[in-house]
């Protein structure tokens, strides 16, 4: 099991729905990281990008999967929180700050512009 602390070189993966992607502009919208419970992500820990994408696709047929770095998360003044669940030891969340899981629109926008699309079946 991964440790509670994150490494600076870690990345986090999130499944995105097609309505959270601006097809005309070719970019994510801030909605991709808006969730009242905190933006659910999977940390990569020692896994490859492909392993992370495949694991997310096992859970749900996401049309888009993005990757955001630990550094980008902290640069956006957000807080990554490790919260493993029984069926996923890599589960984490991105919070606005300690005790505040919902990201502000500006923080969600910052993350959406920092995120890299690593899987896109919509194209």
Image: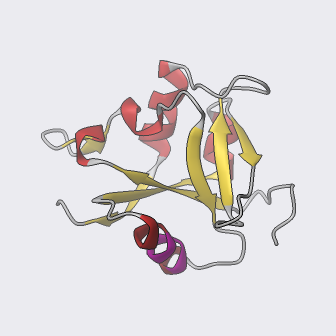
Q: Is residue 70 magenta?
A: no
Give the image quarter of residue 32: top left
Residue depicted at 21% across the width and 46% down the height: 26
Left or right of 65 on screen, residue 89 = right
Specify the quadrant that holds the N terminus: bottom right
Query: Is 64 situated above or below 109?
Result: below
Total number of numbered discs in the rendering? 0
Q: Nearer the viewer, residue 89 or 43?
A: 89
Q: Which residue is depicted at the point 61% across and 32% down?
A: 76
Query: Which quadrant of the figure contains the C terminus?
Result: bottom left
Residue 97, image x, y percentages: 73, 26
- Against 64, is 79 above or below? above
Check the image and report above or below for 78 versus 104: below
| Farthest residue, direction left | 24
Rendered position, 69 above or below 97: below
Q: Position of residue 41 (x, y in %)?
A: 57, 52
Q: Residue 119: which quarter of the image?
A: bottom left
Between 85 and 57, the one nearer to me in the picture: 85
**Most prominent secondary structure in the magenta stretch?**
helix
Q: How was this image coloured?
A: secondary structure
Magenta segment: 51-55
Q: Residue furthest front?
A: 86
| Image position, residue 57 (x, y; %) | 40, 70
């Amino acid at each position: 099991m991964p440790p509670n602390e994150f490494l600076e070189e870690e990345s986090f993966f999130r499944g995105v729905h097609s309505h959270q992607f601006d097809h005309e502009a070719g970019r994510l919208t801030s909605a991709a990281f808006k969730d009242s419970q905190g933006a659910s992500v999977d940390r990569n820990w020692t896994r490859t990008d492909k392993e992370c994408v495949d694991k997310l696709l096992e859970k749900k047929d996401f049309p888009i999967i993005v990757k955001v770095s630990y550094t980008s998360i902290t640069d956006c003044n957000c807080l990554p929180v490790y919260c493993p669940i029984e069926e996923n030891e890599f589960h984490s969340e991105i919070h606005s700050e300690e005790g505040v899981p919902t990201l502000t629109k500006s923080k969600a926008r910052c993350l959406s512009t920092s995120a890299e699309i690593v899987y896109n079946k919509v194209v």
